[in-house]
Image: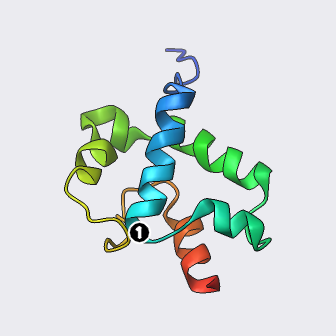
């Protein structure tokens, strides 16, 4: 029987910026969402935490590479993004 430990998480600062840049790419202003009461600080922290465990980014630079080719506010949330549901929910609430 093989025993695998938990998957290591990516760097918190790197993934903070990836999550923030993904939000900007798809047209979500996380600060404005917090100010409007649609996003709590804990939810923002969970968004970054999910990003830190993302297999898409870990496997091939996924969103980091994807973000290089996006115009802020003009992209659709990619299906591989672990925060897709959160971003789409915030977009729908605006």
The answer to whether one can see residue 87 in this image is yes
Q: Secondary structure at mark 1?
A: helix
Is 80 left, or right, of 92 in this rendering? left
Residue 34 in percent (x, y) is at: 73, 63
Which quadrant of the figure has residue 80? bottom left
Residue found 74% across the figure and 72% down from its top:
38
Q: Is residue 28 above or below residue 48?
A: below
> 91 or 1: nearer the eye?
91
Q: Is residue 84 above or below residue 55?
A: below
> 85 or 18: nearer the eye?
18
Q: Identify the image quadrant of the C terminus.
A: bottom right
Q: How many marks?
A: 1
Residue 76 in percent (x, y) is at: 35, 73
Is 5 left, or right, of 72 in this rendering? right
Q: Residue under circle 1?
A: 26
Dot 1 crowding, Cα within 10 Å, few <14, some 14–19, many 20+: many
Residue found 76% across the figure and 67% down from its top:
35
Is 85 left, or right, of 76 in this rendering? right
Residue found 38% across the figure and 71% down from its top:
73
Residue 60 in percent (x, y) is at: 24, 36
Residue 90 in percent (x, y) is at: 61, 74
């Amino acid at each position: 029987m093989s025993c695998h430990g938990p998957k290591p998480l990516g760097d918190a600062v790197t993934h903070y910026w990836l999550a923030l840049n993904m939000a900007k790419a798809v047209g979500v202003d996380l600060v404005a969402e917090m100010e409007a009461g649609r996003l709590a600080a804990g939810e923002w922290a969970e968004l970054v935490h999910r990003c830190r465990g993302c297999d898409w980014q870990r496997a091939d630079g996924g969103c980091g590479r994807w973000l290089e080719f996006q115009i802020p506010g003009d992209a659709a949330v990619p299906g591989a993004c672990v925060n897709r549901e959160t971003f789409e929910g915030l977009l729908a609430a605006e």
